[in-house]
């Protein structure tokens, strides 16, 4: 029984039951090694699921239970759907994979699902034909909105879907959209929804941290892509370039100035943030030693951090006031800077994409997730017994950050300036 679309008379009540059931489908109820067809029948009867959804569940369960052979990859898919990452840094690190897929399927129409706040990052990417905004915590929140979005995707008739996020929901989205070839990593109880799966690297029963660039290129390799180059690639767009030029003109920044961008915040949480007074000390010393133009950049909710640092300083950096730069403008500005000093935040990868030297002050996160393209990067991290903890807020004394002194950051900055900036 082919599935063309979900019937209009499928009740919200039944969909609620289905939605609540889906995350548990690889658990004790439907797990092939523990379950049986009788158990499956009981579950479907209990859920009173519509026959269309019953077919979907039975088909996927049978595939998992019998080890059905992966379907052949379409040699020339006409339409490809990508589920892209939700974090700035992860999205930048995904761009080599986008480039690889475009080169492998030059004639395909490639669409990408992305949350609206990140669209400016890849709006002018030559690797994508279309961006589909999706905001599950905003306008697309709730069951009815989710079903409308699924129905919209089903009407598109995509040939292939690739999940560049490892969440259960990303595979579920491709699965319910009726995409025949679904590619992703076999983790988070979602393998049964993917037709082409890549196993994550494991050691001692745990996933081994692998940098995001190589992780995404691993899926490209699974598809047979041959361009596996790792350099991120960003395209700000003409308007963003003009806005960056206007900013430089307004604040008297010349091309031969030593422009150093500092990013003292982190969207992830305060555990990633270096001490504010340390940032102030480093900025003061770089102005004194090199007559550097220092520009502090604030992300959403980070203006207070920047204002506090500026009050602590004895020298005068560039004061952007209460401006929060759009991501595309920030990209274009990074293209014009000499160097960046930052916490482990998304914009550090802008510097990599534009081949700029960058000093990264890293705290609670494992550096192996981002240890690619480090030719012009110095990562400063203190080894502590409790790290890397990946917590958003430190429950103790934040020693992983406080033990990194301003002198260490200054020394790293001097090395970068001498090697790459003063030529």
Image (cartoon, rainbow, N blue to C red):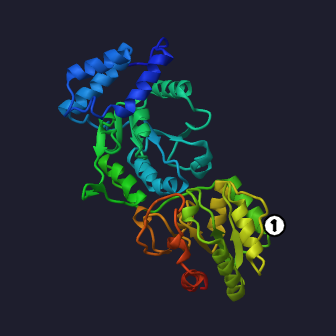
Q: Nearer the viewer, residue 397 or 50?
A: 397
Q: How many marks?
A: 1
Image quadrant in which the C terminus is located = bottom right
The residue shown at (57%, 58%) is 269
Q: Is residue 84 visible?
A: yes
Q: What residue occupies the far bottom of the structure in this picture?
A: 289
Q: Is residue 32 left or right of residue 182?
A: left
Q: Residues within 10 Å of mark 1 (few under 14, many from 20)?
A: few
Q: Which residue is mark 1?
A: 250
Q: Quadrant of residue 49?
A: top left
Residue 125 % position (x, y): 55, 50
Quadrant containing the N terminus is: top left
- Tell me which residue sits at (70%, 75%) in the image: 294
The structure residue drawn at horizontal position 77% and vertical position 81%, both measured from the top left corner, is 314
**x and y percentages locating residue 376 in the rendered image:** 50, 75
Q: Would you place residue 304 above or below residue 32 in this image?
A: below
Q: Nearer the viewer, residue 120 or 262?
A: 262
Q: Nearer the viewer, residue 163 or 156?
A: 163
| Quadrant position of residue 346 | bottom right
Q: Residue furthest front?
A: 396
Q: Residue furthest top?
A: 9
> In the rendering, at what x and y percent does residue 396 appear?
52, 66
The image shows residue 219 at horizontal and vertical percentages of: 35, 49
Residue 81 lies, with reference to residue 319, above or below; the image says above
Identify the residue at horizontal 30%, vertical 52% (top origin).
Answer: 200
Instruction: Inspect this view and state whether residue 178 appears.
Output: no
């Amino acid at each position: 029984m082919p599935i063309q679309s979900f019937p209009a008379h499928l009740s919200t009540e039944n969909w609620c039951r289905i939605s609540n059931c889906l995350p548990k489908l690889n658990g004790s109820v439907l797990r092939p090694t523990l379950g049986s067809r009788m158990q499956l029948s009981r579950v479907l009867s209990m859920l009173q699921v519509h026959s269309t959804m019953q077919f979907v569940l039975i088909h996927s369960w049978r595939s998992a239970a019998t080890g059905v052979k992966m379907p052949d990859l379409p040699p020339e898919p006409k339409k490809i759907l990508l589920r892209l990452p939700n974090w700035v840094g992860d999205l930048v690190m995904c761009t080599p994979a986008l480039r690889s897929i475009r080169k492998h399927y030059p004639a395909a129409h490639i669409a990408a699902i992305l949350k609206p706040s990140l669209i400016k990052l890849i709006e002018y990417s030559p690797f994508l034909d279309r961006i589909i905004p999706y905001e599950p915590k905003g306008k697309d929140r709730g069951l009815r909105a989710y079903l409308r979005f699924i129905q919209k995707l089903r009407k598109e008739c995509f040939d292939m879907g690739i999940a560049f996020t490892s969440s259960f929901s990303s595979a579920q989205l491709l699965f319910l959209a009726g995409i025949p070839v679904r590619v992703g990593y076999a983790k988070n109880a979602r393998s049964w929804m993917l037709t082409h799966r890549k196993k994550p690297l494991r050691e001692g029963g745990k996933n081994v941290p692998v940098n995001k660039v190589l992780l995404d290129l691993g899926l490209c390799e699974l598809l047979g892509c041959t361009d596996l180059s790792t350099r991120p690639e960003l395209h700000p767009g003409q308007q963003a370039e003009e806005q960056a030029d206007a900013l430089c003109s307004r604040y008297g920044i010349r091309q031969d100035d030593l422009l150093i961008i500092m990013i003292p915040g982190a969207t992830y949480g305060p555990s990633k943030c270096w001490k504010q007074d340390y940032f102030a000390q480093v900025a003061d010393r770089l102005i004194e030693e090199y007559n550097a133009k220092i520009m502090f950049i604030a992300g959403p909710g980070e203006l207070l951090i920047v204002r506090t640092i500026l009050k602590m300083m004895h020298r005068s950096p560039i004061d952007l006031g209460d401006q929060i730069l759009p991501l595309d403008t920030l990209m274009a500005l990074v293209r014009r800077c000499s160097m960046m000093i930052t916490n482990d935040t998304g914009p550090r990868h802008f510097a990599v994409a534009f081949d700029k030297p960058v000093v990264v002050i890293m705290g609670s996160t494992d550096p192996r997730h981002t240890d690619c393209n480090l030719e012009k990067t110095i990562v400063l991290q203190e080894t502590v017994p409790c790290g890397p903890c990946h917590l958003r807020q430190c429950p103790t004394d934040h020693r992983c950050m406080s033990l990194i002194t301003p002198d260490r950051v200054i020394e790293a900055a001097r090395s970068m300036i001498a090697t790459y900036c003063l030529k």
